[in-house]
Amino acid sequence: MRETMESYVIPAKDEILVARKHAEVAEALIRLLQAKGLKVVNTRTAGLAPDLYTLEHAVI
C-alpha cells in the first residue's frame, strides 16, 4: 500500500480549555506511597528519566 501524498484540509475547531492534571495525580501518588512507608524520588535528568520511582520494594 502506497502512502498518500496529496494535501488535505483539517477544518478549524472551537478553542478548548485544557486542564493539566499530571502534577495533582503525581502528588497524590507520592502521598499514598509515602503513607505506605515507601521512599520515593521525583526527579528528571535532562527530561528523559521517569519522574517518580520508589527506592525500595514493598507489597502494597
Image: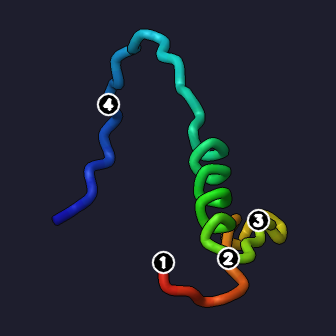
Q: Could you say where residue 17 lies in the image, as x and y percent from the top left?
A: 52, 18
Q: Could you say where residue 36 lies in the image, as x and y percent from the top left?
A: 61, 71
Circle 1 SS class: loop
Are the residues tagged 2 and 3 within 8 Å (C-beta)?
A: no
User: Amino acid under label 2?
Assistant: Leu
Residue wearing tag 2? 38
Seen at 30% across and 40% down, the residue is 6
Q: Nearer the viewer, residue 16 or 34?
A: 34
Q: Nearer the viewer, mark 1 or mark 3?
A: 1
Question: Residue most toward the top?
Answer: 14
User: Amino acid under label 4?
Assistant: Tyr
Q: CA distance from mark 2 to mark 3?
A: 13 Å
Seen at 55% across and 28% down, the residue is 19
Q: Nearer the viewer, mark 3 or mark 4?
A: 3
Sequence order check, earlier mark of 1 and 3: 3
Q: CA distance from mark 2 to mark 4?
A: 52 Å
Seen at 16% across and 65% down, the residue is 1
Are the residues tagged 1 and 2 within 8 Å (C-beta)?
A: yes
Q: Is residue 55 left or right of residue 25?
A: right
Q: Residues within 10 Å of mark 1 (few under 14, many from 20)?
A: few
Up-down relation of residue 28 to residue 43 (above or below): above
Up-down relation of residue 49 to residue 35 (above or below): below
Q: CA distance from mark 3 to mark 4?
A: 43 Å
Residue wearing tag 4? 8
User: Amino acid under label 3?
Assistant: Asn
Q: Nearer the viewer, residue 29 or 17?
A: 29
Residue wearing tag 1? 60
Q: Could you say where residue 37 lies in the image, as x and y percent from the top left?
A: 67, 75
Sequence order check, earlier mark of 3 and 4: 4
Sequence order check, earlier mark of 1 and 2: 2
Circle 3 SS class: loop
